[in-house]
C-alpha cells in the first residue's frame, strides 16, 4: 500500500477538527450497526475536511457527491485517504457519481462484514 | 493583440488579451474558450436562472455551499446563452444529450446539443469560482481546477502516470509543484472528457506531462491562461487548430434581460494572466 503523509486535523470556522480513523481490526469484528456508525463518522470527518465544515454538518443522505462539493481532485483525495486508512479499494468513478455519501458508507460497510469473506475480496473497484 | 505562441508551427497560438469581440462563427482552424467567474452581489441576484431547465434549477439548489450552486448556475446560463448565440437558438430552447460512452456504448459520454448541430462540439468545466466553456468544430474537452493545497497534490499525484509523478516530484516543493500538478491534471481531465470516458479511464493510463511529443496521438492539449489561483486546459481531437481564443464572459451577459453580445458588448475588465 502506498504510504502517504496525511494530517489528522483540519480547520473550520468553528475551530480545529481532529480526525479519528477507525480501528480496521475492530471494523472486521463488530456488528453491522456499530460498523456503520464507525464508518459513517469517519466518512463525515473526511468529507468535512474537504468541505471545511464540521463532521456533523455533512449531509450524508440528501445530496449527490458533486453537490457536496466533491470534484475530480477532491474525489481522488478522498479515495486515496480512505484506501490508505481502511485498506480497501474504491472505484473513483462510482465514488464521484454516488447519489449520496450514504452509498459510499454502505459500500465500505459491506467490505468489512462477514459477507465480504463469503464472497472473497468484495472490492468494488 | 497579445499572443502566446506555445510551439511555433506545431502548436496552436493562444490569444487571450485584446481580442476583438467574438463573431460567434465556427471554424475548423479555431477553438473558442469562454471563462466565467462566479457572480456575486447584484450580479448574482440578476443571474438569468429562469433560463435553466427544471433539472438544472434543482441541482443549483442542491449544492451544500451556496457559492458552488451559484457557479453551477452561472456556468449553465453561460452555456445556454453561448451555444444559443452560435446556433441562433434561444437559451431556454437549447437542449442537451449525452453521446454514447466510447467504453460501453451507454449514453453517458460527452455532453452535446440535442439534436446535434454539426459541426458544433462543446465542453464545460467548473471549479472554485471559475467555469470554462469550450466550443469548436471537433470533439474537445476542457478542464479548469482551483489549484489544490500541497498535501492534496502529494496525495493525488499518486493517481497519475508514473512519469508524471516523477516530474511533479522533481518540481520545487510548494507553489511550483502545485502549478505543475494543476497543469498536468487539467490536461489529463480535458483529454479524458474529450475522449468521452471521463475518469472511468484511469488517470494513470495516459501521459500528459511536460513533454508534448509524448502526449496521446491525434489529440492536441493546450494550457489556458485563467487566473493566479486556477489551472485550465483544452484537449482538441485531430490536427491542432491554428488558434485558441480565450475570453472572459462579462457578468452582464448572464443577467436576466441581458444577452451574449458581439461587437457592442462591454469588454470584461478582468485581465487574465498567462499560465
Image (tube, rainbow, N blue to C red):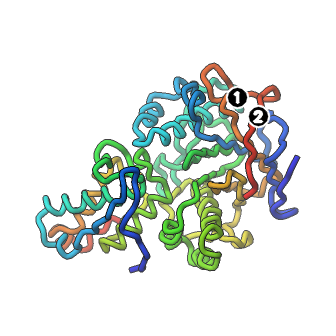
Residue at 51%, 72% (x, y): give it: B154
Residue that protrudes farthest toward the front in the picture: A15
Which element is circle 2 on?
loop
Residue at 74%, 36% (x, y): give it: B268
Which element is circle 1 on?
loop
Q: Mark 2 falls within which chain?
A: B
Residue at 45%, 28% (x, y): give it: B54
Q: Position of residue B90 (x, y in %)?
A: 63, 23
Find residue A51 and name its label. Answer: none
Of the image marks 2 and 1, the number of the one nearer the N terminus: 2
- Answer above or below: position of B172 versus A69: below
Q: Position of residue A108 (x, y in %)?
A: 27, 63
Mark 1 crowdedness (10 Å alpha carbons): few <14, some 14-19, many ≥20 = some
The residue carrying mark 2 is B24
Q: Quadrant of the C terminus of chain B?
A: bottom right
Q: Mark 1 falls within which chain?
A: B
Q: Gap between marks 2 and 1, in whole Å?
A: 10 Å
How many numbered marks appear? 2
Find residue B260 and name its label. Answer: 1
| Discs 2 and 1 share one subunit | yes
Q: Position of residue B217 (x, y in %)?
A: 69, 66
Q: Nearer the viewer, residue B84 or B41?
A: B41
CB within 8 Å, label 2 to label 1: yes
Q: Nearer the viewer, residue B195 or B184?
A: B184
Residue that protrudes farthest toward the top in the picture: B257
Horizontal side of B272 relative to A8 (left or right) equals right
Amino acid at each position: 500500500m502506498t504510504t502517504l503523509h496525511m494530517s489528522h486535523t483540519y480547520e473550520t470556522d468553528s475551530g480545529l477538527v481532529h480526525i479519528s480513523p477507525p480501528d480496521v481490526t475492530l471494523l472486521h469484528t463488530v456488528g453491522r450497526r456499530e460498523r456503520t456508525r464507525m464508518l459513517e463518522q469517519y466518512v463525515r470527518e473526511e468529507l468535512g475536511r474537504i468541505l471545511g465544515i464540521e463532521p456533523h454538518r455533512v449531509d450524508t443522505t440528501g445530496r449527490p457527491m458533486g453537490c457536496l462539493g466533491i470534484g475530480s481532485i477532491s474525489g481522488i483525495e478522498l479515495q486515496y485517504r480512505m484506501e490508505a486508512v481502511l485498506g480497501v479499494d474504491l472505484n473513483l468513478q462510482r465514488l464521484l457519481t454516488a447519489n449520496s455519501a450514504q452509498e459510499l458508507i454502505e459500500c465500505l460497510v459491506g467490505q468489512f462484514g462477514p459477507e465480504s469473506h463469503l464472497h472473497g475480496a468484495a472490492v468494488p473497484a | 493583440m497579445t499572443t502566446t505562441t506555445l510551439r511555433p508551427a506545431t502548436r496552436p497560438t493562444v490569444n487571450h488579451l485584446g481580442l476583438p469581440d467574438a463573431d460567434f462563427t465556427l471554424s475548423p482552424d479555431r477553438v473558442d474558450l469562454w471563462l466565467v467567474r462566479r457572480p456575486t452581489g447584484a450580479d448574482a441576484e440578476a443571474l438569468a436562472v429562469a433560463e435553466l431547465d427544471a433539472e438544472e434549477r434543482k441541482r443549483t439548489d442542491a449544492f451544500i455551499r451556496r457559492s458552488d450552486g451559484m457557479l453551477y448556475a452561472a456556468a449553465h446560463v453561460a452555456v445556454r446563452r453561448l451555444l444559443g448565440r452560435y446556433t441562433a437558438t434561444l437559451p431556454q430552447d437549447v437542449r442537451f444529450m449525452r453521446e454514447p460512452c466510447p467504453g460501453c456504448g451507454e449514453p453517458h459520454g460527452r455532453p452535446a446539443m440535442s439534436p446535434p448541430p454539426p459541426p458544433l462540439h462543446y465542453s464545460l468545466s467548473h471549479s472554485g469560482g471559475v467555469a470554462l466553456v469550450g466550443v469548436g468544430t471537433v470533439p474537445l474537452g476542457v478542464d479548469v481546477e482551483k489549484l489544490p493545497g500541497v498535501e492534496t497534490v502529494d496525495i493525488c499525484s499518486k493517481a497519475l502516470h508514473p512519469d508524471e509523478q516523477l516530474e511533479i516530484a522533481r518540481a520545487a516543493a510548494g507553489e511550483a509543484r502545485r502549478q505543475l500538478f494543476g497543469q498536468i491534471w487539467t490536461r489529463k481531465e480535458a483529454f479524458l472528457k474529450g475522449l468521452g470516458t471521463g475518469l472511468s479511464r484511469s488517470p494513470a493510463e495516459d501521459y500528459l506531462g511536460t513533454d508534448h511529443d509524448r502526449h496521446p496521438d491525434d489529440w492536441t492539449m493546450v494550457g489556458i491562461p485563467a487566473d493566479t489561483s486556477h489551472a485550465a486546459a483544452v484537449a482538441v481531437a485531430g490536427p491542432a487548430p491554428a488558434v485558441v481564443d480565450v475570453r472572459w464572459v462579462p457578468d452582464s451577459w448572464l443577467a436576466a434581460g441581458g444577452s451574449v453580445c458581439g461587437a457592442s458588448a462591454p469588454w470584461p475588465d478582468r485581465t487574465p494572466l498567462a499560465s
